[in-house]
Image (spheres, rainbow, N blue to C red):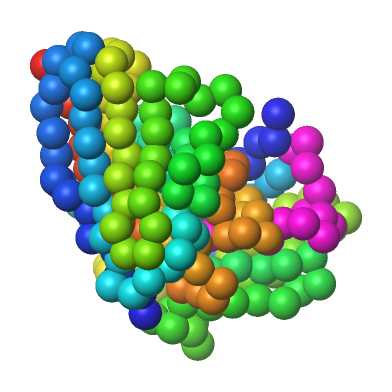
Amino acid sequence: QVQLQESGPGLVKPSETLSLTCNVSDASVNSHTHYWDWIRQSPGKGLEWIGSIYYTGHTYYSTSLRGRLALSVDPSRNHFSLRLHAVTAADTAIYFCARRTLDNFFDYWGLGLMVTVSS
Amino acid sequence: DIQMTQSPPSVSASVGDTVTITCRATQAINRWLAWYQHRAGEPPKLLIYAASNLIGGVPTRFSGSGSGTEFTLTINNLQPEDFGTYYCQQANSLPPWIFGGGTRVDIK
């Protein structure tokens, strides 16, 4: 069974950089048939797709975060990562990592990690 | 960007009832639509892809229909384990991949 698990800090100060990692089990981030994505859910709101990375390193970013968001993939550790710069309170959310098929469906998700931006 | 509107925002139903959730897209997306179930403390779960294809292991009381701009998720014979929030997602060829606002299903 494919499993994804987010890890990282639960609290980040405003203006700092949020770094999260998604560890993947029973699947390879070197897959030619899947992308690796990040989705977040702000308090009281719905799901917001924020970015995607392919094993080649090719990325897609949400226009709302472009310029602050950087995704990377590490096949040697079978994980992928997110770095979000200059965070504000608006970045407070549950961050999910997910695997996306070539047909753009998210077939496996992590449990999610709550990240609060506060001083 | 394509926007997705779900209705109703919430529904309370009894075991055995039929629940219908609607999702509308601002542009035609053919059948590029998925439905997810999200229960607290669990990862979101893909139920249906390409509008009407049930993921293996998902009970057949779940069904999806529609194409173009209007889609429906139907839960027949509602069971206690079906509580949670349901989201649609447009899976068009280009990002961003937008989710509907969600429909919370409560069991009476």
The residue sitting at 32% across, 64% down in the picture is B69
A57 and A72: which one is in front?
Answer: A57
The residue sitting at 45% across, 22% down in the picture is B60
The residue sitting at 59% across, 44% down in the picture is A107
B53 and B4: which one is in front?
Answer: B53
On screen, residue A7 versus residue B62, left or right, reads: right
Magenta residues, start to end: A25-39
Residue A47 lies, in percent from the top left, at 35, 56
* Residue A85 is at least partly visible in this image: no
- Residue A91 appears in which quarter of the rendering? bottom left
- Residue B26 appears in which quarter of the rendering? bottom left
Residue A116 lies, in percent from the top left, at 34, 56
Residue A73 lies, in percent from the top left, at 74, 64
**In the image, is residue B103 part of the stretch drawn in magenta?**
no
**In the image, is residue A38 part of the stretch drawn in magenta?**
yes
The residue sitting at 56% across, 34% down in the picture is B55
On screen, residue A79 versus residue B23, left or right, reads: right
On screen, residue B9 versus residue B71, left or right, reads: left
Residue B106 lies, in percent from the top left, at 18, 26
Q: Quadrant of the C terminus of chain A?
A: bottom left
* Residue A32 is at least partly visible in this image: yes
On screen, residue A98 versus residue B48, left or right, reads: right
Q: As displayed, is residue A17 above or below residue A45?
A: below
